[in-house]
Image: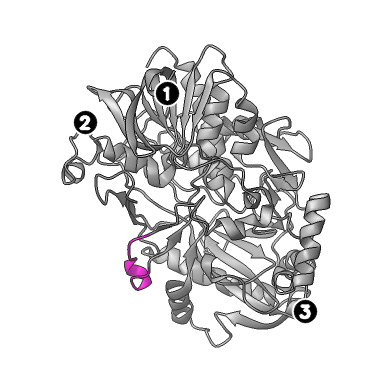
Amino acid sequence: MQIEDREFDYIVVGAGSAGCVLAARLSERPDISVLLVEAGGKDDGFWLKIPVGYGKTIIDEKVNWKYETEPNPALGGRRIYWPRGKVLGGSGSINGLIYIRGQAEDFDHWRQLGNEGWSYDDVLPYFRKAEDQERGEDEYHGTGGPLSVTDIKERNPLCDALIESCEKIGIPRNDDFNGTRQEGAGYFQATIRKGARCSAAVGYLRPALKRPNLTVITETQAKRVLFEGTRATGLEVQRDGQSFSIRCRNEVLLAGGTVNSPQLLMLSGVGRGEDIAEHGIAVVHDLPGVGRNLHDHYGGQITWRCTQPITMNDIMLSKRKQLAAGLRWLLFRDGPLAVPAGQACVFTRVMPNSQTPDVQFLFQTFSGGYYEDGLFKFSGFANFICPVRPESRGSIGLRSADPLEPPLMRPNYFSSERDRTTAVEGLKLARRIASVSPLSDFVSAEHLPGADVTSDDEIEAYFREQGGCVSHQVGTCKMGNDDMAVVDPRLRVHGMSGLRVIDASVMPKLVSGNTNAATIMIAEKGADMVLADRGTV
């Protein structure tokens, strides 16, 4: 039977981190039929398996949408590159593999905004449910879940030096950023299993593929959600140049992420009416918050020349060292190629009125430009300074009615004075840490922004001219009950039936750290909500 001749209980749109979780959890019920639709292909490439493969996939158009923002006013009109996964596993298949949940206060704030059921106590069981924690089970961590969370085995002396220098200036050591507190300096954990990437496609979807009630179609572009009145009844898709419709009995679940979920809603006639009509699309439901509330972690890096040849730059600049590292990974699944994008981290406070960490330092044992620029041709390391609670807000809008054309991405980075001040103070603190032994023993010179950049205005100008994002975009289908909310606390689209959004776009405010873990948690909780409401929506 052709796919267009079948009817499914649930259609999940987008096989990223959230979509893989949804498809796997819903299909655990043998009486439920699930269709998972993905625009990208299968996650079977070599560079998708090896942890440092992110250095390749981050610019590979075969697995990456390679989006670019509109010119940013506060950045002198610069466009910022946005890598987003176009493959099973989505951005979780090409990301830096870092496992950070955010602060407990982040989720308590979601609840304070009116989102019942989303406090830290409410979401912690779902973090634990998802996790297969290498260190074992405790109050904060779970074992036996689909997502492997492991310690970094290859420990670079630079990371130990960072942590020790932090302790000397009063920043405490923290061996678990996802435990009792986030504040401090320590090593990341990563979504790595036996030396290889453990994305949601690997951990959740792959074991579920053998189920007869789960159907997965790749290289299939969603064009629009189909409605009868305001009830979602199916999905129109395009595959191999041909368009066809697929029927749905219960619900269509959008998991396309912060860029593509609002885009698909607008293409389907759900969003700000005047914006939709401008592109000749019939308005199904005027919902002004769709695409608004876009925010992301924007920051910049401070880079140093290293006194010893112990960085990733040194490995990649030597054919012999490259070969040795490659063989070590192939034979033993360990070594310098089996580590995430950042190995150590600092969460701390730089603003006088902050009660919890307001900045994150992603410490990297390599140094280079952004994405396509590659590594510097010398031994070097870096600290990426990232204000974790940005106030700057932007939007996603339609460029045209063509679903194959990228939407307008206007992040409005660095428009908030507090964001700018936090970044400046963060860089000054990073310099202070690097001036203290033992980390200072590894610094021969500051490469960027350079020792001559000293005043607050000069540092701010550096962030404007050379800063970048870490691709933590959220918020464009905000959860809540106010006039600009898109989904309610059960992730149902306001004013619609049979339609939910379950991905990072529903975060009303960005978590204080990397977003993949929280996105998987949202999908775990969302799947439970879908099952609990089965037959009532």
Compare marks 1 and 3 and give the one earlier in the sequence.
1
Alpha carbon distance from label 1 to label 3: 62 Å
- Residue at 69% x, 43% y is 179
Residue under label 2: 284
Q: Does 218 appear above or below 165?
A: above
Please state if 151 lies on the left or on the right of 231 as rendered.
right
Between discs 2 and 1, the one toward the N terminus: 1
Give whichever of 397, 73 is nearer the camera: 397
Tag 3 residue = 441
Q: In this view, does 520 lie above or below 460?
A: above
Of pointers 3 and 2, the one earlier in the residue sequence: 2
Quarter the C terminus occupies: top left
Q: Name the residue under label 1.
A: 3
State the extent of the magenta-drawn residues as a range. Answer: 69-78
Give the spatial CA distance, label 3 vs label 2: 63 Å
Question: Which of 50 and 92 lies nearest the eye of the viewer?
Answer: 50
Can the viewer see residue 223? no
Point 52% across, 60% down: residue: 59
Amino acid tagged 1 = Ile
Query: What secondary structure is found at the residue carrying circle 1?
Result: helix
Estimate the spatial distance between the alpha carbons at disc 2 and disc 1, rounded to whole Å: 26 Å
Q: Quadrant of residue 157 in the image?
A: bottom right
Q: Residue at x 48, y 46 (%)?
A: 86
Main SS, magenta region, reads loop
Q: Do the residues labelled 3 and 2 touch (CB within 8 Å)?
A: no
Residue 182 image position (x, y, % from top left): 64, 50
